């Protein structure tokens, strides 16, 4: 990882997503960009600027705060305050980064809105998302990682994004939900040799079959926690019927209920 972006909004240094981004940037020597998206500065009906925009002084103070935080953590970084529509601006700017780190509200009145914005950013082609639940108190070492595997391109993109973490992890567990075929569907593509590829990447892993009859999201979350995983890696919102049936429906549940960090790609 050489470039990481963290969606700071109005967060402070104490926000777990900010703390995680700082820890990863220091660990990998990455440049860390703080991103605070401002609404378009349009004139209202009385010719006054949008009240939600920051004054020049407030923007300067916010940038100075971020530089001080990064300096204290021995990280190179700057704060950007672009004006634009939230989701497309977030998605587009994130593409200059290897990873976009963002807070995730779960089980709160605001959670559906936040999850919806993050989902739309993924659909809009954002960088892979590392989502840290608000209030999370666990480690950001990610020494134990779980992977939800369903053979989809989305899952592969998530695994590629997680490679630096997977190579350093002490324990990687792959929950294999891939299916060769489903009734009424044409034959599936040949399975990918993911185990051999992991071996070439120097990743130590355990391979576990995963086929719950229902409640895929809760089951995957519970299995990952039972393995003491500190991070769950998976594809989000698979485009094909196959990936939707196997893991796609889990995305919605995890965004609303997860108690552990998620690394998602679409």
Image: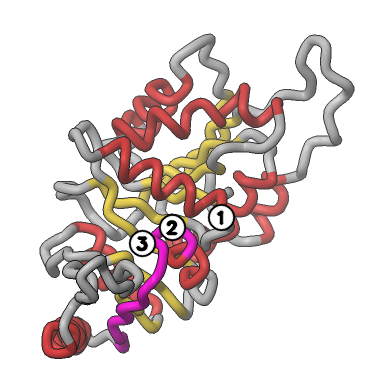
Q: Are marks 2 and 3 in contact (CB under 8 Å)?
A: no
- Reply above or below: 174 against 9: above
First along the sequence among labels 3 and 1 = 3
Residue at 60% from the left image edge and 30% from the top image edge:
176
Say which of 68 and 73 sits in front. 68
The image shows residue 223 at horizontal and vertical percentages of 39, 27
Q: Are marks 2 and 1 in contact (CB under 8 Å)?
A: yes
Q: Residues within 10 Å of mark 1 (few under 14, many from 20)?
A: some
Q: Is residue 54 magenta?
A: no
Kindly tell me whether residue 117 is visible in this rendering: yes
**Circle 2 residue:** 87
For residue 157, side relative to residue 194 (left or right): left
Task: Determine the secondary structure under disc 3.
Answer: strand
The image shows residue 149 at horizontal and vertical percentages of 59, 37
The range drawn in magenta is 76-88
For residue 77, side relative to residue 28 (left or right): left
**Circle 3 residue:** 101
Q: CA distance from mark 2 to mark 1?
A: 8 Å
First along the sequence among labels 2 and 3 = 2
**Circle 1 residue:** 124
For residue 169, side relative to residue 153 (left or right): left
Residue furthest front in the image:
46
Q: Residues within 10 Å of mark 2 (few under 14, many from 20)?
A: some
Say which of 83 and 234 sits in front. 83
Residue at 16% from the left image edge and 60% from the top image edge:
15
Residue at 53% from the left image edge and 41% from the top image edge:
236
Q: Tell me the colour scheme of the image.
A: secondary structure
First along the sequence among labels 2 and 1 = 2
């Amino acid at each position: 990882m050489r470039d990481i972006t963290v969606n700071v909004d109005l967060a402070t240094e104490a926000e777990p997503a900010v703390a995680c981004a700082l820890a990863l940037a220091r660990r990998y020597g990455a440049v860390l960009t703080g991103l605070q998206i401002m609404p378009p500065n349009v004139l209202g009906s009385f010719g006054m600027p949008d009240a939600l925009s920051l004054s020049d002084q407030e923007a300067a103070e916010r940038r100075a705060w971020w530089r001080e935080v990064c300096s204290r953590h021995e990280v190179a970084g700057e704060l950007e305050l672009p004006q634009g529509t939230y989701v497309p601006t977030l998605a587009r700017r994130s593409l200059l980064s290897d990873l976009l780190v963002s807070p995730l509200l779960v089980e709160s009145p605001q959670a559906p809105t936040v999850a919806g914005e993050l989902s739309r950013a993924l659909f809009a082609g954002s960088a892979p998302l590392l989502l840290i639940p608000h209030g999370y108190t666990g480690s950001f070492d990610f020494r134990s990682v779980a992977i939800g595997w369903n053979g989809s391109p989305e899952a592969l993109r998530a695994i590629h994004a997680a490679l630096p973490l997977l190579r350093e992890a002490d324990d990687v567990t792959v929950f294999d939900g891939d299916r060769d075929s489903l009734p009424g569907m044409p034959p599936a593509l040949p399975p990918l040799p993911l185990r051999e590829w992991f071996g070439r990447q120097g990743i130590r892993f355990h391979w576990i079959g995963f086929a719950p009859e229902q409640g895929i999201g809760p089951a995957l979350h519970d299995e990952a926690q039972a393995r003491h995983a500190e991070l769950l890696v998976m594809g989000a919102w698979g485009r094909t019927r196959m990936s939707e049936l196997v893991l796609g429906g889990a995305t919605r549940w995890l965004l609303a209920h997860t108690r552990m960090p998620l690394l998602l790609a679409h």
